[in-house]
Image: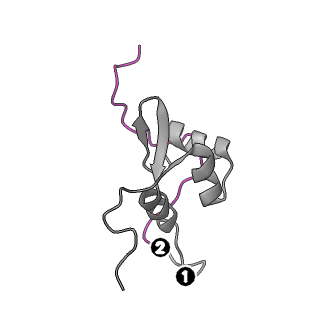
């Protein structure tokens, strides 16, 4: 059965829609974006948008089959972490 969405551009969601998709608050998703712990996003003009495939991939990183399963990856909480994420901008003084 052919995919009815084949050939269409990917669907993008704004922050409130993406947060609802992930069952998070919009503020939590904004914090993830700030700390670099969230799903990949794009800036289109002044708007932040998320591709559905990126939201699914980020959520799938936390998939586990049991409490002892290390899983494929970890979805970090929306806060600063001990290991800093490389800063791509100007050096801070």
Predominant secondary structure, magenta span: loop
- Please indicate, yes or no, whether residue 79 appears anywhere in the rendered image: no
Quadrant of image for the C terminus = top left
Q: Answer few, some or many: residues within 10 Å of disc 2's Cα (few below 14, many 20 plus, some between 14 and 19).
A: some
Q: Give me the residue at 43% from left, 57% from top.
A: 54
Q: Relative to 65, is 54 above or below? A: above
Q: How many labels does the image show?
A: 2
Q: Does the stretch in magenta take in 69?
A: no
Q: Does the stretch in magenta take in 78?
A: yes
Q: Give me the residue at 65% from left, 55% from top.
A: 20
Q: Give me the residue at 42% from left, 49% from top.
A: 40
Q: Give me the residue at 60% from left, 59% from top.
A: 22
Q: Which of 58 and 76 is in front in this view?
A: 58
Q: Position of residue 60 (x, y in %)?
A: 48, 68
Give me the disc on residue 65: 1
Q: Is mark 1 on a helix, strand or loop?
A: loop
- Please indicate, yes or no, whether residue 12 appears anywhere in the rendered image: yes
Contact check, label 1 and label 2, Cβ < 8 Å? yes
Magenta stretch bounds? 72-93
Of the residues under marks 1 and 2, which one precedes in the sequence? 1
Relative side of 89 to 71, left or right: left
How much space separates mark 1 and mark 2, taking CA atoms? Answer: 8 Å
Relative side of 35 to 20, left or right: left
Q: Is mark 2 on a helix, strand or loop?
A: loop
Find disc 2 in the rendering and name its residue.
71
């Amino acid at each position: 059965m052919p995919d009815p969405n084949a050939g269409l551009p990917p669907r993008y969601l704004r922050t409130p829609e993406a947060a609802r998709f992930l069952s998070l608050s919009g503020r939590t998703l904004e914090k993830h974006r700030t700390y670099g712990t969230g799903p990949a996003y794009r800036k289109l003009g002044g708007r932040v948008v998320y591709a559905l495939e990126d939201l699914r991939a980020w959520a799938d990183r936390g998939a586990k089959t049991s409490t002892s399963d290390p899983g494929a990856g970890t979805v970090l909480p929306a806060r600063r972490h001990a290991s800093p994420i490389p800063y791509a901008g100007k050096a801070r003084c």
